[in-house]
């Protein structure tokens, strides 16, 4: 465990010395020494591999679901393999961020990693679909912690020279994982077994976790963060946040293509309860701020959402997550059904989106390294996403894929890569030291929330199109190398292909509209006073020193009494 007392004493001593120092020396007295560059690089590899694996598993099953459904003879419920991970991943990001304030960043990260690896291996050994769904849920809990805690640790331990490139690095990893998932899933399913999409996390994750443990810095290199207690954890708020996030997405995912259930209780009741939980969460957070601000740390601090720049960045991330994850799932499916591609090739054709996402993150990091350009980049990136989605909506339903489709994916990937990077920077510079963990956790959570709603919306659109053009069909019509769908007549096959082509184009039009709203929201990020990450760190170092100085002055004896 992290030496809490030693770290606290070091913080106390440093700040005591700083009280009598000049402003120019405050940073030197309070800021911990920088981690040696080589050790930092090795440590960051261990951390970012964990981030890569956790986000990879949100999409790696996209091209393997059919093979899993065939083996377990459960095509009608196979979507729960993806849904179980996504819902657990979505619901617990902020909770893990808060727990890291209690038990420490290192221990929280290690616990998350152990849960993730253990249940990844369990997924590979699953004997039934029920077991697989249960193991995927537990795996999602670990993945959620890896995702949110990575976003907290990296800004805290990065040397000043590396901080300016931090947003770009994180953006590259997240963007790569999102697109690499279907590619790797298709590759492993095609040449080995679908079970290897889970087993592969074992050796890679184990090596990464060992690297992280061995390279974790000594206390003197860690920031002076305030350690919380279990009594301060907002248990009710955490439960409300998890329930609200999950129940808003669950009914859309659960109903999926079953369009006749949209007016039934199975859809309406969970959605209404989810909305009520969100309203209750906001009311509870406001109550804590007014009555118990010194007793409980709220799961969702309202002061964060009152920050216009941060709130705009969160909303933009939510909206852009919608088209990005939707395309990661819907485009390979379109390639398989409309264009007759196998799962491997369908995944490989997402590579242009992967490459451009990485380029976008690098561009964002370069622009933000010399000044805070998050406002301008967020608008440009959102425009790229709208342009890409609009162009993708023009694809024809011909059996031969139009090459221009791969070029259109580049615009979406470029925009998403920039946005991931700028959102990470915005969450860092727009939050106080105490709220830093939850600020990154919220940003991580809404990105997955937006994508989950996008995937659910795509399923609904597909269901509507198939019902209008084909009528009721069992899921056995899905195309695959195993020959499923051979029972359909030629006319039905053509109708299914046309329905999926039309549904994808409608998906892209919806995504373009959502992206347009994201552009408008981005204008809320404008600010005349902007800081980059190193300047933000210095500012908070000075504020902590001044606060400590004021507290000590108030207790200095005057004429034999204390003030």
Image (cartoon, rainbow, N blue to C red):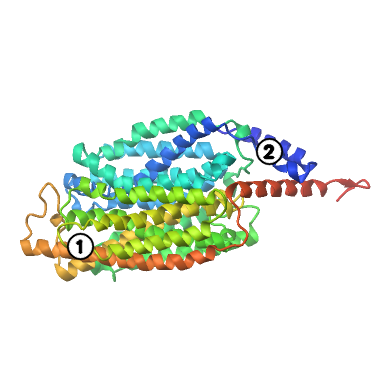
Contact (Cβ within 8 Å) of mark 1 with mark 2: no
Total label count? Answer: 2
**524 and 88: which is toward the camera:** 524
**Of the numbered discs in the image, which one, if any, rests on residue 174?**
none
| Residue 532 shown left or right of residue 11 in the figure | left
- Residue 143: give x, y in percent of width and height: 40, 44
**Of the numbered discs in the image, which one, if any, rests on residue 11?**
2
The quarter holding residue 445 reads: bottom left
How far is the residue under mark 1 from the one under mark 2? 60 Å
**45 and 280: which is toward the camera:** 45
Relative to 425, residue 527 above or below? below
**Of the numbered discs in the image, which one, if any, rests on residue 500?**
1
How many C-alpha atoms fall within 10 Å of the one at disc 1: few (<14), some, or many (≥20)? many
Q: Residue at x 36, y 63 (%)?
A: 387
**166 and 256: which is toward the camera:** 166
- Residue 154: give x, y in percent of width and height: 52, 42
Q: Is residue 85 visible in this depiction of the protein?
A: no
Element marked by disc 2: helix
Q: Is residue 347 visible in this depiction of the protein?
A: yes
Furthest residue to the right?
A: 559
Element marked by disc 1: helix
- Residue 209: give x, y in percent of width and height: 43, 33
How many C-alpha atoms fall within 10 Å of the one at disc 2: few (<14), some, or many (≥20)? many
Q: Closer to us: mark 1 or mark 2?
A: 1
Relative to 370, residue 28 above or below? above
- Residue 556: give x, y in percent of width and height: 85, 46
Q: Residue at x 39, y 31 (%)?
A: 206
Quarter of the image with the N terminus is top right
Specify which label sits upstream in the sequence, 1 or 2: 2
């Amino acid at each position: 465990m992290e030496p809490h007392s030693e770290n606290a004493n070091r913080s106390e001593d440093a700040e005591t010395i700083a009280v009598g120092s000049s402003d120019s020396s405050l940073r030197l007295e309070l800021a911990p020494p920088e981690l040696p560059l080589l050790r930092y690089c090795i440590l960051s590899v261990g951390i970012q591999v964990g981030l890569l694996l956790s986000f990879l598993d949100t999409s790696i099953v996209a091209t393997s679901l059919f093979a899993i459904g065939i083996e377990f003879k459960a095509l009608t419920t196979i979507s729960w393999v993806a849904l179980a991970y996504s819902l657990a991943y979505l619901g617990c990001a902020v909770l893990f961020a808060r727990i890291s304030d209690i038990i420490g960043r290192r221990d929280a990260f290690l616990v998350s990693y152990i849960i993730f690896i253990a249940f990844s291996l369990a997924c590979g050994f699953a004997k039934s679909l029920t077991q697989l769904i249960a193991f995927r849920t537990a795996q999602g809990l670990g993945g959620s912690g890896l995702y949110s805690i990575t976003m907290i640790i990296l800004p805290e331990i990065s040397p000043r020279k590396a901080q300016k490139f931090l947003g770009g690095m994180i953006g590259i990893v997240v963007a790569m994982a999102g697109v690499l998932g279907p590619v790797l899933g298709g590759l492993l399913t095609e040449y080995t077994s679908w079970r290897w999409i889970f087993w592969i996390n074992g050796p890679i994750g184990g090596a990464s976790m060992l690297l992280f443990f061995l390279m974790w810095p000594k206390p003197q290199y860690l920031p002076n963060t305030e350690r919380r207690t279990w009594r301060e954890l907002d248990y009710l708020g955490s439960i409300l946040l998890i329930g609200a996030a999950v129940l808003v997405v669950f009914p859309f995912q659960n109903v999926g293509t079953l369009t006749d259930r949209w007016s039934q209780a199975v859809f309406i009741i969970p959605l209404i309860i989810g909305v009520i939980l969100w309203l209750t969460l906001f009311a509870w957070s406001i109550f804590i701020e007014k009555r118990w601000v010194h007793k409980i740390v709220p799961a969702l601090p309202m002061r964060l959402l009152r920050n216009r720049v941060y709130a705009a960045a969160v909303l933009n991330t939510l909206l852009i997550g919608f088209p990005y994850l939707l395309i990661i799932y819907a485009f390979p499916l379109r390639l398989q059904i409309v264009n007759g591609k196998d799962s491997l090739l369908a995944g490989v054709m997402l590579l242009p989106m992967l490459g451009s996402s990485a380029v976008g993150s690098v561009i964002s990091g370069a622009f933000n390294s010399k000044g805070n350009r998050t406002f301008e980049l967020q608008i440009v990136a959102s425009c790229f996403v709208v342009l890409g989605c609009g162009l993708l909506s023009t694809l024809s339903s011909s059996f031969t894929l139009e090459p221009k489709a791969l070029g259109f994916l580049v615009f979406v990937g470029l925009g998403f890569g920039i946005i991931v990077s700028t959102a990470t920077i915005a969450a860092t510079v727009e939050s106080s030291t105490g709220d830093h963990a939850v600020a990154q956790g919220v940003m991580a959570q809404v990105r997955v929330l937006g994508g989950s709603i996008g995937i659910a919306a795509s399923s609904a659109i597909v269901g509507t199109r198939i019902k209008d053009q084909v009528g009721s069909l069992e899921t056995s019509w899905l195309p695959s190398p195993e020959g499923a769908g051979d029972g359909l007549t030629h006319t039905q096959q053509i109708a299914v292909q046309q329905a999926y082509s039309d549904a994808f184009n409608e998906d892209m039009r919806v995504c373009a509209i959502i992206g347009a709203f994201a552009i408008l929201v981005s204008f809320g990020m404008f600010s005349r006073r902007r800081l980059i990450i190193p300047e933000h760190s210095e500012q908070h170092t000075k504020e902590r020193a001044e606060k400590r100085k004021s507290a000590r002055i108030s207790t200095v004896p005057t004429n034999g009494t204390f003030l």
